[in-house]
């Protein structure tokens, strides 16, 4: 499941939970509660507003974290593969999120698997042209 699917699933779960809680609140018989709790008028207690603000802050933080993680994974890096035996160097470009331990997928869609004798060097600076 890709990142958009995960975000959509999260939004659907949150919306479902809100609908269930709202349905439970309507199904409950109204209770007779005094308008004053412990000497403080009920309208002066900002618990509902604070809870809503906290939930919105947490959702905003989660959305920001997901966006920044997605954006960082889309950064294009320059990959230099060096064969230790022959000294042959090959240059590639790949997104940060597509680079794994011993393999990566280039921006052209080519999957590269490295041999044990090769080493990978990753840089944000493009290679010098001769």
Image (tube, rainbow, N blue to C red):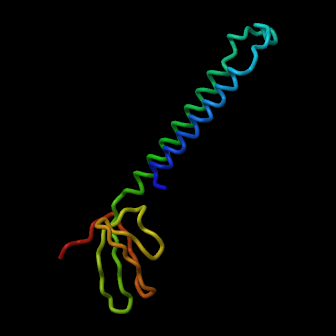
Asked where in the image residue 74 lies, by quadrant, the reply is bottom left
Q: Position of residue 94 (x, y in %)?
A: 34, 66
Residue furthest to the right: 38
- Residue drawn at x 76%, y 16% is 29
Camera-side residue: 92 or 14?
Answer: 14
- Residue drawn at x 58%, y 27% is 53
- Residue drawn at x 35%, y 79% is 81
Q: Is residue 40 above or below residue 1?
A: above
Q: Position of residue 19 (x, y in %)?
A: 61, 30
Whether residue 36 sits left or right of residue 18 in the image: it is right
Image quarter of the C terminus: bottom left
Asked where in the image residue 46 lies, by quadrant, the reply is top right
Residue furthest to the bottom: 85
Whether residue 44 sits left or right of residue 88 in the image: it is right
Q: How many marks?
A: 0
Q: Position of residue 15 (x, y in %)?
A: 56, 34
Q: Position of residue 89 (x, y in %)?
A: 30, 82
Asked where in the image residue 104 lies, by quadrant, the reply is bottom left
Residue furthest to the left: 130
- Residue drawn at x 73%, y 8% is 41
């Amino acid at each position: 499941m890709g990142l958009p699917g995960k975000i959509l699933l999260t939004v659907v779960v949150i919306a479902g939970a809100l609908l269930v809680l709202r349905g439970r609140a309507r199904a409950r018989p109204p209770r007779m509660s005094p308008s004053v709790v412990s000497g403080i008028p009920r309208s002066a207690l900002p618990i509902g507003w604070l809870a809503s603000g906290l939930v919105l802050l947490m959702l905003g933080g989660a959305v920001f974290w997901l966006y920044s993680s997605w954006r960082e994974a889309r950064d294009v890096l320059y990959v230099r593969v060096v064969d230790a035996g022959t000294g042959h160097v090959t240059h590639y470009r790949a997104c940060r999120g597509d680079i794994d331990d011993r393999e990566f997928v280039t921006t052209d869609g080519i999957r590269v698997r490295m041999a044990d004798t090769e080493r990978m060097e990753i840089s944000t600076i493009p290679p010098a042209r001769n």
